[in-house]
Every structure is written in C-alpha cells, then in structure tokens.
Image (cartoon, grey):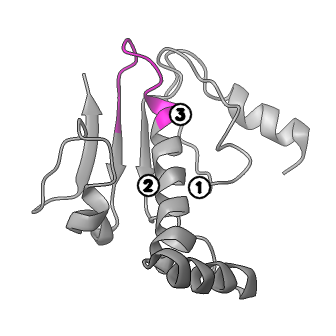
Amino acid sequence: MTEAGQAAFLDAFAPGGRGIGFAVLGGVFSEGVDLPGDRLIGAFVATLGLPQVNPVNEQLRERMEAAFGCGYDYAYLYPGLRKVVQAAGRVIRTREDRGVVWLIDDRFARPEVQEMLPAWWEVSSSEPRSMDKR
C-alpha cells in the first residue's frame, strides 16, 4: 500500500463512523497509528501473530533454547503476543477509551498464553477470549 493509500485507509476511520478495515498484525498500521475517541472501537485478532519460521528465527530459537530453555517462546510466542497486545493498544489507549478486542484463535485459551496477557482482560475458556473495557 502506498503512503497515500495508507493515509486514505486511516482517514476512513472518522469520528462516529461505521467503517470496517482489515490489517495484518505487525504490518504498517501496528505502530504510530492514533485513532482517538470513537474512531476505532474494536478489533478482531485471528492469530497469535507468530513470526514466520525461517533460518534466522530458527537459529534464534536454537540459541535461546541452549541458553535459557523455552527457545520457541523467545523466538516465536513472545514476539507474536507483543503484536497482539499492540493491536489491542490501537483500540484501548487511555482510561477514557472504550472498545472491544476479540481474540478468536483457540490458542488464546491455553493457560501459558493467557498468563502472558494483561490480567484485566476478561477470560472465558468456553467462548472466544475477549477484552472489553467499559
């Protein structure tokens, strides 16, 4: 997407608007985006945001495993969950913001994943995990 296209995409999120947009976790809209008030009131996160398996990440996994154990967590899980929390931060930035973030990947129900997410996020093991701050 060109810079002009990015600007047009963000401009579509007008106050009181009813637009829907789709973006990739960790993509160009993951940082430096501020849609205050009711310009962005929700997000659906459909994945843990794990980095791709490639030689660099595999080397990192192997080295972290040798040094600390849990190499997979350091190379894949932690960076992925950081993207998820950043995505939620596009919706809920301040105490005054209101919105909902739905985490719709079954892996969010795993205890080891849940314990890494903010404690104030509502948890339901029988339904999709949601963050609803009202």
**Image spot of residue 67 (x, y percent):** 54, 78
Q: Does residue 11 show up magenta in the picture?
A: no
Distance of mark 3 from mark 1, alpha carbons? Answer: 11 Å
Q: Can residue 53 be seen here?
A: no
Q: Residue at x 68, y 43 (%)?
A: 29
**Image spot of residue 33 (x, y percent):** 67, 31
Q: How crowded is mark 3: few (under 14 residues within 10 Å), some or many (20 or more)?
A: many
Element on which disc 3 rests:
helix
Distance of mark 1 from mark 2, alpha carbons? Answer: 8 Å
Element on which disc 1 rests:
loop
Q: How crowded is mark 2: few (under 14 residues within 10 Å), some or many (20 or more)?
A: many
Q: Left of 105 or right of it: where is 68? A: right
Give the residue type at disc 1: Leu
Q: Residue 45 carries which label?
A: 2
- Could you tell which of marks 1 and 2 lies nearer the N-terminus? 1
**Image spot of residue 16 (x, y percent):** 49, 16
Q: Give the range drawn in magenta.
A: 89-100
- Relative vertical location of residue 24 with respect to residue 33 in this rendering, above or below: below
Q: Mark 1 points at which residue?
A: 25
Q: Which residue is drawn at 23% across and 35% down?
A: 120
Q: Mark 3 points at which residue?
A: 90
